[in-house]
Image (cartoon, helix red, strand yellow):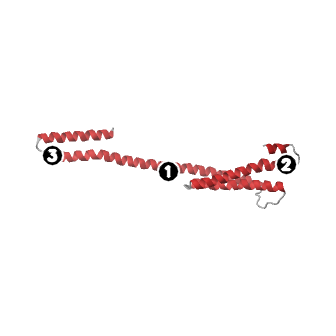
Amino acid sequence: IVLVSLYFDDPNGGTERILLRVGIKSLIGGIIFIVSSILLFNSSKTGIGIKFIIFAFLAYGILQFNIFLTDAFQVSGAQYDLAIPFHMIGVIDLLLQSIMGLGMIISVLEIEQFNLKRANSELDTFLYRSSHDLRAPLTTISGIVQVLKRETDPQKNSNYLSLIDDKVDQADNVIK
């Protein structure tokens, strides 16, 4: 800001003002996007959405760095052969921002798909355990009924009926 204000009233400071206003912003933005793409690449390699974001961040950072170099070479009066035509910068900028947005949407969908798969797995585990917990008392009751059908001693029959009652209570508690 201080450097821009120094050249603000200088009639000969036109190109320097452009470098300070646009070039420095592009340099800082370019560095931030390139570093962000490297950090994202190193921290997470899952999903096509993240790959879109990494690509777009890196390309956007390079585009911004190219804008800085174009401005810097223009101020110094030197030839810069890799300058992107001015009319193409906006198109490339829009394309890269669109890829970033698409990558973010795909990434969110991938995360939701992962969460849905995890929830389905937890539901499957719950259903397996619930069916097992419900089936165990019923299997025991069925076995006791088979023994009870052959038993003639009333005292033992009373014990078996008490066991059946306990297993019914156990199944009822599982359901509750």
Considering the image in quadrants, where does the C terminus appear?
top left
Along the line of sight, which residue is nearer the eye, 149 or 155? 155
**Labelled pair 2, 1 in contact (Cβ < 8 Å):** no
Q: Could you tell me residue 7's position as x and y percent? A: 84, 45
Q: CA distance from mark 2 to mark 1?
A: 53 Å
The kind of secondary structure element at disc 1 is: helix
Sooner in the amino-acid sequence: mark 2 or mark 1: 2
Check disc 3 and give the amino acid type. Lys
Mark 2 vs mark 3: give the one in front.
2
Check disc 1 and give the amino acid type. Phe
- Residue at image mark 3: 149
- Residue at image mark 1: 114
- Residue at image mark 2: 14
Residue 135: in sight, yes or no? Answer: yes
Q: CA distance from mark 2 to mark 3?
A: 105 Å
Mark 1 vs mark 3: give the one in front.
1
Sooner in the amino-acid sequence: mark 1 or mark 3: 1
Q: Could you tell me residue 108's position as x and y percent? A: 56, 48
Check disc 2 and give the amino acid type. Gly
Q: Could you tell me residue 34's position as x and y percent? A: 66, 54
The kind of secondary structure element at disc 2 is: helix
Q: Could you tell me residue 29's position as x and y percent? A: 70, 50
Vertical placement of residue 161 versus 74, above or below:
above
Q: Is residue 129 left or right of residue 5?
A: left
Q: CA distance from mark 1 to mark 3?
A: 52 Å
Considering the image in quadrants, where does the N terminus appear?
top right
Q: Is residue 83 left or right of residue 167?
A: right
- Identify the residue at horizontal 82%, vertical 55% (top origin): 74
- Identify the residue at horizontal 74%, vertical 48% (top origin): 25
